[in-house]
Amino acid sequence: MRNTPKLLLLLLLTFLLAEGALAAEPFQIIKIAGIFDLSGTGKVWGNAEHNGFNLAISDFKAANRDFSVEAKVEDSEYSNSKSVSAFQKLTAVDGISMIVGPTWESFVAVMPLCESNHIVCLAPSNNSKELERQDLAYSFSAYFDERGYTSVIAEEIKERGLMKVGVVANISAYHDPIVDNLLSLLPNKPILI
């Protein structure tokens, strides 16, 4: 038991050194980027996503004082080629390893790059069937599954026995799955007007 004081002293020094090392550690820097449709066809939702991105960063900084966040943003102009160019600039030139965006169809264009370059990419809005692939490790979407709310509408149509249903929609990545899901959930196919 003669070594007990030495062992306790060594243990205490280890804790003190660990405390000092943690306290002396500089801020950790998080580099993140956004690719949003800030102009062009998608500027309404692109600017809303950009505002949400900035708000999330502000909230994170306020709650995590030990981190510094460096954020960069590129405009994809709702273009696949501009989205790919923005991705390449942000990753190769700016050294970004986490990207929010792009959205909708443009996200599908950058998914192969996210996967092959091991860059975490989160689409604010994308419901592509491409996201159902089991081999994806870096591509994600924050978008909800429209099957959830179309099933509620389909149940109401079935309960009422409706055979003529008006659906206001257009041809788009957003509306097509809603109509497809409604039709798949209804055994007696109504006439969609």
Image (tube, rainbow, N blue to C red):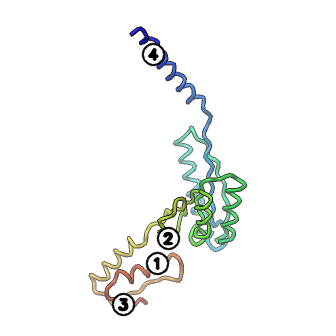
In depth, the one of 92 and 127 nearer the eye is 92
Q: Is residue 157 above or below residue 131?
A: below
Q: Quadrant of residue 35?
A: bottom right
Q: Helix, strand, or loop for circle 1?
A: helix
Say which residue label 2 marks. Answer: 127
Q: Residue at x 50, y 64 (%)?
A: 135
Tag shown at residue 164: 3
Near-viewer residue (116 or 98): 116
Mark 4 or mark 3, which is nearer to you? Answer: 4
Q: Are marks 2 and 1 in contact (CB under 8 Å)?
A: yes
Q: Does 23 sit above or below residue 125?
A: above
State the separation of the CA atoms marked 4 and 3.
83 Å
Amino acid on which the number 3 mark rests in the picture: Lys
Query: Image check: 92 left or right of 118?
Result: right
Which label is found at residue 7? 4
3 or 1: tag closer to the N-terminus: 3
Going from N to C along the chain, the mark reached first, 4 or 2, is: 4
Q: Which residue in the protein does label 1 denote?
A: 177
Q: Residue 165: name its quadrant.
A: bottom left
Nearer to us of marks 1 and 4 is: 4
